[in-house]
Image (cartoon, helix red, strand yellow):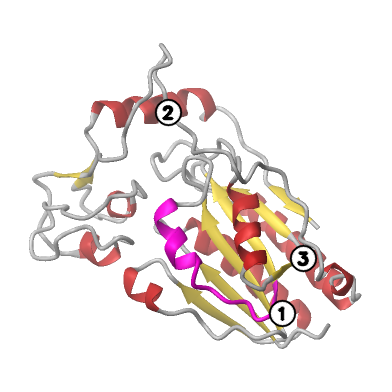
Amino acid sequence: MKIEKVWKIYFSPTGTTRKVVTLLGEEIAVALGVPADEYNFTLPSARQNFPQVESGDLVIFGMPTYAGRLPNLMLKYLATISGKGALSVPVVTFGNRAFDNSLIELRNILESHDFHTVAAGAFSCEHSFSTELGAYRPDWEDECEIKDFAHSIAEKISAGKAEHLEASAIEVPGNPDAGYYQPRDRKGNFIDIRKVKPFTGSKCVNCGVCARICPMGAIDPSDVTSVPGICIKCNACVKRCNRGAKFFEDKGYLYHKEELEAMYGGERADNRIFL
């Protein structure tokens, strides 16, 4: 099968998924000698449409892992996508703990919308809650792995090995019927952070950056201290505020963050690739 174009399509509030998908897609495009295009559906305005993917395209489709699954508020948009028989590579990122069932969920969604998955990957990145978990990842070592993965995919396609796989999905681990990861305290009690929202401190100058980059459009642009919409705890507003004016102060949220850092902060989670 001859590839005509490589697509880099992703949801990436804090930019790490974008980095992985962009590098992977660009390396594959160069290796195959074809153009690359990009579609970022992080902001609400971009989720009104989906690019015109064709049967001769290869789509690198990236999503972050939230609580062991895909962000549930993105599922409505993902139900609108169409692959038209294009080959695809589902890619998920995770915050140095585990990707659990997000990769198999994304693979299944792509397969059910007329994409043919021929490879897949899960890459550890800096956790959205923390600057300690997976700090600065994807880093140079990750980039080397991503480039090697890209060339393996290009070789697979060039050798025609992807063609006979069009009738079956790439095999990945996970349970598509599993629930979301539930944070608990040391007594086993469930910590519910679903309705927690960020706080705005005195350093805020109401520049509006946080409102413009919020993937849920949850922050009031006329008063950024107000968050009337749904917050998915992606931390885009926290990490991209150059004045450090946005932060979370909910005790349950902070406890969960500190527990994650204590349990997983001292290790480097491995990336996983499937070919």
Give the residue number, with chain letter if any, for mark 1: 30
- Crowd band around label 1 with a 10 angstrom C-alpha radius: few (<14), some (14–19), many (20+): some
Q: Is residue 151 magenta?
A: no
- Residue 138 appears anywhere in the view: no
Measured along the vertical axis of the image, is residue 215 above or below residue 262?
A: below
Q: Amino acid at mark 3?
A: Val
User: Do tag 1 and tag 3 residues touch (Cβ < 8 Å)?
Assistant: no
Residue type at numbered disc 2: Pro
Under circle 1, the secondary element is helix
Measured as percent of width and height from the top left, residue 163 is found at 86, 75
Could you tell whether 231 is left or right of 62 in the image? Answer: left
Give the alpha-carbon distance from disc 1 to disc 3, as whole Å. 18 Å
Q: Which label is found at residue 118?
A: 3
**Residue 59, above or below 258:** below
Q: What is the magenta range?
A: 72-87
In front: 127, or 63? Answer: 63
- Residue at position x 53%, y 78% in the image: 38
Q: Is residue 274 left or right of residue 211?
A: right
Q: Earlier in the sequence, mark 1 or mark 3?
A: 1
The image position of residue 240, as x and y in percent, is 31, 56
Q: Which mark is residue 77?
A: none
Quarter in which the N terminus is drawn: bottom right
Residue 256 is left or right of residue 154, and the answer is: left
Residue 94 shows in the view:
yes
Neighbour tally class for label 3: few under 14, some 14-19, many 20 plus, Cα within 10 Å: many
Label ID, residue 183 = 2
